[in-house]
Image (cartoon, rainbow, N blue to C red):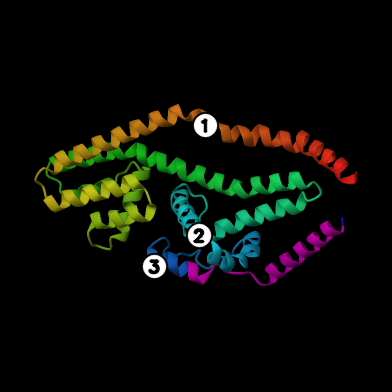
Amino acid sequence: MPTAIALLAALFAMIAIYEMLPVATSVRNRQFDVIRGAASADDPNAGRALPFWRVILLPLNPLLAAILPARLREGVRQKLYWANFSGSWLGWNEVEFWGVSLAAAAATFVLLLKTPIVAVLGALIAAIMPYILLRNAARKVERSLVRELPDALYLIALMTSVGIVLPDALRRLADAPHRSVFSNWLQIALARSHGGSLVAAIRAEAELAGAPRLVAMATKLELIETRGASGSVDLLRALADDQAREYRQEAERRAKGIGSELLFPIMICFFFPYLFVVAAPLFANIIQLFVTR
C-alpha cells in the first residue's frame, strides 16, 4: 500500500509538471525526419506537445540510443516505416519504441511484484506486446504491397508497350485515381526524386524500406532504364512473372506454416492466462512452503 500511494503521488506530480511545462517534439528527431523526407518542413503539427506518457520516457532515449544493438534498431526502424503507411506509430523512432517496451515491462513487474513468478511472466508479455502490435501493422502493409506488385508491373509493361517511356509509366501509376499501397509508395519515391531520376529514387526508397523484393525490382528497373526502349517490355513482363511466382511460393509456404504461426497467439490467449489465474499462484504457494521450512 505505501508503494502504491507513493506511485500515485509521483504520477500526480509529473502530471502537474507536464501541464505547466509542456514538452515539444524533439527538435533533433524532427530535423532528421525533414532531411530524409519523412516529414514536411512546414508541417503544422511539427511543434505539437508529446502525450504525457511519452514525455515520461524521454530520459530513457539517450541511454537506449547508446546501448541498443544496431540490428535491433534497424529491424524496428523498417517495421515503423511500413506501419506508418497504415497510420499507426506515427512520429515514433526505434529508440522511443524500445523505450516504451522497457517501460511497460518495468511497470508490469512492479505492479505484480507481490507474486514474483507472475511478475516475471507479466513483464515478458508487456515487453513483447508493443513489438507484436508493430509487427502486425507492418506485415499487413507489406503483404498488401507484395500482392499488388505483380499486377502493377504488368500494367507498367503494358504502358511501355504502347510507347510510354518507363519514368512516365511510373508517374502515371503513382498518380492513378484508384489508390493502392504500391501507388502510394511510388508517390513517395516520386516526391523524393526532386526532379532527378525516378528509378534512382525508387532504388533509394527501397533500400530505406528494407524490402528485398522492392530492392530487386529497383535493380531491374535500373537495368531496363539503362537499356532504353529496346526489350524493355519483355524485361518488365519477366520481372512481373518473377514477382508473381515468388508471391505464390510465399503464399504456399505461409499456408503450410499456419500451424506454427497460430502457436504464439494460442500461448498468449490461453496458456499465459492459465498461468496467471491457476498455475502461478499454485507454484508460488508451493515455493513458499519450501522456503518457510
Residue type at numbered disc 2: Pro
Q: Main secondary structure of the magenta part?
A: helix
Q: Quadrant of residue 282?
A: top right
Please state the horizontal and vertical placement of residue 223, each as a whole percent of the image: 18, 50
Please state the horizontal and vertical placement of residue 290, each as a whole percent of the image: 86, 42
In whole angstroms, how far apart are the C-alphas of marks 2 and 3? Answer: 24 Å
Residue type at numbered disc 3: Ile
Residue 51's tag is none
In whole angstroms, how far apart are the C-alphas of marks 2 and 1? Answer: 28 Å
Task: Check disc 2 and report the residue beneath it.
Answer: 69
What crowding class fits label 1: few (fewer than 14 Cα within 10 Å), some (14-19), or many (20 or more)? few
Using the rendered image of the protein, determine whether residue 171 is visible from the camera's viewpoint: no
* Front-lying residue, 173 or 104: 104
Task: Give the left or right position of residue 120, taking residue 254 as reference.
Answer: right
Figure quadrant of the N terminus? bottom right
Q: Are marks 1 and 3 in contact (CB under 8 Å)?
A: no
Task: Check disc 1 and report the residue beneath it.
Answer: 260
Mark closest to the chain's N terminus, 1 or 3: 3
Mark closest to the chain's N terminus, 2 or 1: 2
Mark closest to the chain's N terminus, 2 or 3: 3
Residue type at numbered disc 1: Ser
Is 37 above or below relative to 186? below
Describe the element under mark 2 as helix, strand or loop: loop
What crowding class fits label 3: few (fewer than 14 Cα within 10 Å), some (14-19), or many (20 or more)? few
In whole angstroms, how far apart are the C-alphas of marks 1 and 3? Answer: 41 Å
* Front-lying residue, 241 or 91: 241
Residue 35's tag is 3
Q: Residue at x 41, y 60 (%)?
A: 38
